[in-house]
Amino acid sequence: MKVGGLKEGRLGLGRSSLFGTMALYVTPISESARLPVAALLLLALFSLLFWSVVAALALLLLMLLVIFLYREPTRTIPSSPLGVLSPVDGEVLSVETVTESQLERQAIAVTIKMQRLGPYVVRSPIEGKIMRQSYNASARTYSQWIQTDEQDDLLLNMIATPLSGTLHYRVSAGERIGQGAHCTVLRFGREVQLYLPVTSQLVVKKGDRVLAGEDILATLVH
């Protein structure tokens, strides 16, 4: 059952959504993890045949950890063209009206703290055209500017950590991206900040737990 765009049972109850999410959703792994998983599996088989059972077990455990961290849960995209979806799994830290410097405008900022153990998949909050993608090295922040067909501008800031590595986008600037589509993988990311038009109708509040590509944060109003 949905309550205001969020599934009942995730509205600030304080319980961990990590294992609950895994239990409820199929969890294939991200494309970026398939090669490391295959390599670890081959090394484990080689160790089992020619070296040590203990080493083989250690490699298998490492492979399972990579699968867990890089899981990509299947999500059901809601039928809401003007709905702004959560880009990541996590907890809403704040919802406030601010002056957004990159696009130089007033905006509603929704900040979401990512789960430390993933999933790390970042999904597009809305359908539209990628206007610009940039990186601020001093702040370790990746930014993606998306513009809808109705000329609504959304800015997504993804704050990385030293363990995040380099982000690789699936869609380049100038191309279109679908609502809820896989955008990138923010490994061990800290948080994301989504800047919405000030006219947006908010659905979430501080403390709510949200799922990427499935829970609606706000609705664009025209």
Image (tube, rainbow, N blue to C red):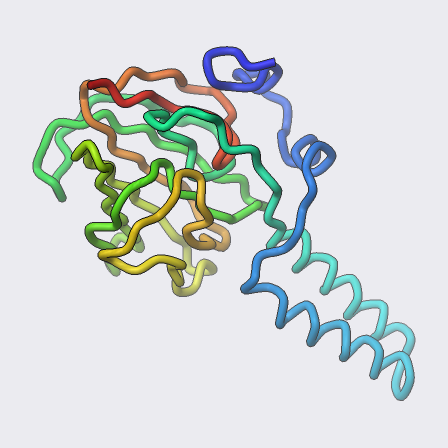
- Picture coordinates of residue 8, whole percent (x, y): 59, 14
Residue at position x 35%, y 48% in the image: 177
Classify 53 as above or below 193: below
What residue appears at the point 84 percent right and 78 percent down from the top-left corner? Answer: 45
- The residue lying at 51 percent from left, 19 percent from top is 6
Vertical order, 24 against 164 (above or below): above
Location of the C terminus by quadrant is top left
Left or right: residue 220 compared with residue 57:
left
> With respect to residue 131, does 89 lie above or below?
above
Where is residue 29? Give x, y as percent: 63, 55
Please indicate whether residue 98 sits to the left or right of residue 203 in the image.
Answer: left
**Residue closer to the observer: 218 or 210:** 218
Q: Residue at x 34, y 22 (%)?
A: 218
**Which quadrant is the N terminus positioned in?**
top right
Position of 47 relative to 129 (above/below)? below
- Would residue 62 appear left or right of 212 to someone viewing this image? right
Question: Residue pushed farthest bottom?
Answer: 50
* Quadrant of the rendered image containing residue 219: top left
Residue ranking furthest to the left: 104
The answer to whether one can see residue 135 in this image is no
Question: Is residue 154 among what the camera can see?
Answer: yes
Q: Position of residue 191 (x, y in %)?
A: 40, 41
The quadrant holding residue 93 is top left
Residue 110 in the image: state x and y as whole percent. 32, 28
